[in-house]
Image (spheres, rainbow, N blue to C red):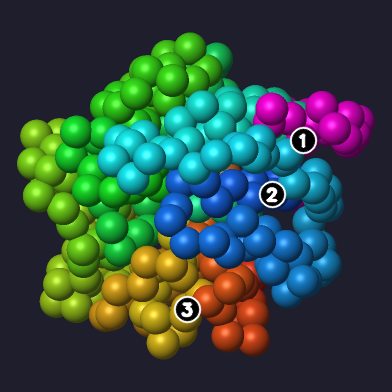
Amino acid sequence: MSESVLEQTRKPSLGRPPGVGRRVSIIGAPCGLGASIAGVDLGPAAMRVAGLRQRVARLGYEVRDLGDMRIECPNTSPPPQEKLRYLSEISAACRALAEDVRKVLEEGELPVVLGGDHSIAIGSVAGVASFCRQREETLGLIWFDAHADMNTPDTSPSGNIHGMPLAVLLGYGAPELTGIEGFSPKLDPRFCAHIGARDLDDGERELIRQLGIRFFTMREIDERGMSACMDEAIAIAAKASGGFHVTLDVDALDPGDAPGSGTVVRGGLTYREAHLAMEKIADAGGALALEIVEINTALDVNNRTAELGVELILSALGKTIL
């Protein structure tokens, strides 16, 4: 069974008043069951090798590294036609992650979640949404991804849950996933912005149109520029009363800059566009949690993608050129 990181460590609170400030807790969620290519479960370790904790601390933050969650390892593989591959294991992992993220926020710290495949966002966002719900506040979302991640069991061509998390968080999918933290949906589409899409499935397009969620495709980014698109995306997410969650799948980036992804799609965000996005998020304030997912160490080159993931976290936490 998955085990909560906080249950493993039980580290005491640093004793400051509630409210996210200059304190960060790193949570590793090395779940690779939502994807089809091995290697993504080592993403958290790769970012630690790239010096994440030390480099965040040099920005002036107090940093706790809570280590990695324990992920249940299945004994057998699901059949190829399975529509929800490894559902019970992913559900257990996301329940544990949601609890960890919520507790970190309650202790006045900012969670930095390291994936793992993007199915873990079901848990991380659920934890932040639960934190907001306790305060009768709403949660916004900025989601960077080449894909919509809005398939359902009925529309998914693969049955891989890492292609479903945004749909789940909006209330569509298996009850074992939508019901985490005891309520659904976790998000209002009016407060959600998706950035970097360039590879969508037909069923996803239909759900996007139905919900009216704001997608900034690569064409729009090309035409308007990253700065204008980010200003609008942040304005959308900031309409939520409680703050917003930021999650970045490295396949949102161009494979030339981020080769370590199992789902690469040419024509993604450039190195500077990605940094600009994170810098604008830092300038705006309001981010309750940060997340980097889908770094596949088996496909990476000299840890380049993990290094970039760390650099983007630093930019989101306020690192500047001057």
Percent x, y for residue 169?
36, 31
Q: Name the side, left or right, on which 264 lies relative to 180.
A: left
State left or right for residue 194 relative to residue 37. Answer: left
What kind of residue is marked 2? Gly
Which of the numbered marks, if any, corresponds to residue 258? 3
Q: What residue is disc 1 on?
A: 5
Residue range highlighted in magenta: 1-24
Label 1 sits on what residue type? Val
3D distance between C-alphas at marks 2 and 3: 20 Å
Q: Between marks 1 and 3, how big is the CA–CA gap?
A: 28 Å
Residue 252 placement, left or right of 293:
left
Disc on the earlier residue, 2 or 3: 2
Q: Which amino acid does label 3 sit on?
A: Ala
Q: In the rendered view, does 85 fall on the left or right side of 43?
A: left
Identified at 14% across, 38% down, the residue is 207
In the structure shown, which secondary structural element does the residue marked by tag 1 occupy? helix
Residue 94 among those drawn in magenta: no
Q: Mark 2: give few (<14), some (14-19) or many (20+) Cα within 10 Å.
A: many
